[in-house]
Amino acid sequence: MKTSSTLSKNIYLFAFIFLITLSANAQLLVEKAEYGRADSLRGYLSPMRSCYDINYYHLDLKIDIDKKAISGSNEFKFTATRDFTKLQFDLFANFKVEKVIYKGKSLTFKREINAVFVNFPLVKKGSKNSFTVYYSGNPTIAKRAPWDGGFVFAKDVAGKPFIATACQGVGASIWWPNKDHQADEVDSMLISISVPKGLKDISNGRLRKTTELKDGYTRFDWFVSNPINNYDVALNVGDFVHFDDIYEGEKGKLTLDYWVLPENLEKAKVQFAANVKPMLKSFEYWFGPYPFYEDGYKLVESPHLGMEHQSAVAYGNKYQNGYLGRDMSTTGIGLKWDFIIVHESGHEWFGNNITSKDLADMWIHESFTNYSESLFTESMFGKQAGQEYIEGTRKAILNQAPVQGIYNVNREGSGDMYPKGGNLLNMVRTVINDDEKWRSILRGLNKEFYHSTVNAEDVIGYINKQSGKDFTKVFDQYLKHTNLPILEIRVLDGKATARWIADVKGFDMPVRLKVKGGDFKFYNLTTAFKPIELAGATKDNIEVDFNYYIGKLFY
């Protein structure tokens, strides 16, 4: 079979591939020849992790800012899924595990890399138990948060501490002990953070209590009443000021709380007012009710660019539109709204409400959220603007590694999961050709998998069932392969025939074609040539709907 590298010069090829630096939160895929014990300890849901279902955490930490150290404990409440005498929790090796307490007694444990194996007396299936891990140490300092994980110790313009955490990908065990696997989200959580007097901690959920401690510290107790994935758990420490608002949403009154540095208060009031309610209106229309009414919606100013921390979205976009003042689509449309508010809040539906069980399926988080930018644009400026925006993001696609990662080794796919994944979803919408049905699918996903963890088959299967079309091979081609499917069109004796060239055996996908000046019409094509009714077609006048992200080839 011919490939794009061997085609002769007289072949007209449109591949729509642009090689520029990945943007937004896209992380470059680091190739790894093989995976070892550390990868499987972190990525594999082994029997010593699956033997217990985590129900509740109480994370109780004190921050020593001068020493850049933390100390405290995390209580694990769980239900045993089978009889066991040993389990695994996760905590990076730079921390000291001081003791593990179960029913008032210390348990023996053994470390292996970033995993800790604890020996228990027999725990019976179905029983509810708890243990508490006490630990201390100096957390990893993030060099370039949020792309690498750890703590950020910064200062505000007044020289006061300004601290945050970000740990997507690397895992929450980089700073607190937990069952660090996305397949098991804790049902609820209490986050208690003690900081020097005069500072505040803003974490997920709702503030239950503030306590002045005798040692010059203040403890802030935040309770998360909804399931939350580990990497969303966050602390934000600073000299914050607060303002609030209410959004009249689909489930009633949604509280909006904003925590920013004092010098940015007026800018924040303007920027948040211009973006937050329009974003919520758009996403509730497309995706369904905001998934965390019980915990509220917060924006918290951060010393890094931003992260989708559930009910406490980190914001560091400098109170400007675009992505630090740049348009991710290069169309100019992206400068009409604040990228971080829209994108990171979009994750409340895809990533936080619907969470992938394995990091290999992180595309579920990022592809849908990239696509949410287009839908928000459509809500604000019309469908054509939304389509132009998503097409503009193609310039960031590299097509050098698959979008889907490798299972069981904590390996996500390439950064193409953002723009390529968003364009894939927009193409699926085009094929369905019914915007109300497409909207019902997006809302249905958030209802069917409400507060759930999923895999690729769950999501693709739901789209197939609700649309009445089988997109399995389409998703396989775009997620598992780097090559774009090529539309090969041959015009013979004035008649056009066409087929797909693809990696996936039996690849089939309808495509919208027209002769220049005519109307688009759907053609169901496979990997076998098929005549198409395009009177007057030549190699120069056949057009493909630009909403398709494909390689287009003529002989």
Image: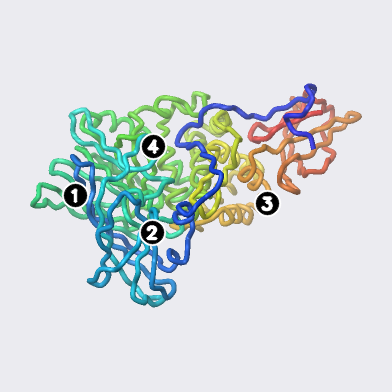
Say which residue appears at 24% left-offset and 39% top-offset.
243
The coloring applied to the image is: rainbow
Q: Which residue is mark 2?
A: 179
Task: Say whether disc 1 or disc 2 marks the residue closer to the N-terminus.
Answer: 2
Q: Toward the viewer: 207 or 520?
A: 207
* Residue shown at the point (39%, 66%) measured from the top left: 87
Q: Residue furthest right?
A: 493
Up/down of 536 relative to 151, above or below = above
Which residue is tagged 1? Answer: 194
Q: Nearer the viewer, mark 1 or mark 3?
A: 1
Judging from the image, what secondary structure is the residue with disc 4 in?
helix
Q: Earlier in the sequence, mark 2 or mark 3?
A: 2
Which label is found at residue 469?
Answer: 3
Q: Earlier in the sequence, mark 1 or mark 4?
A: 1
- Determine which residue is flagged by label 4: 341
Q: Is residue 131 above or below residue 294?
A: below
- CA separation, marks 2 and 3? 38 Å
Whole-Å distance between the Cαs marked 4 and 3? 34 Å
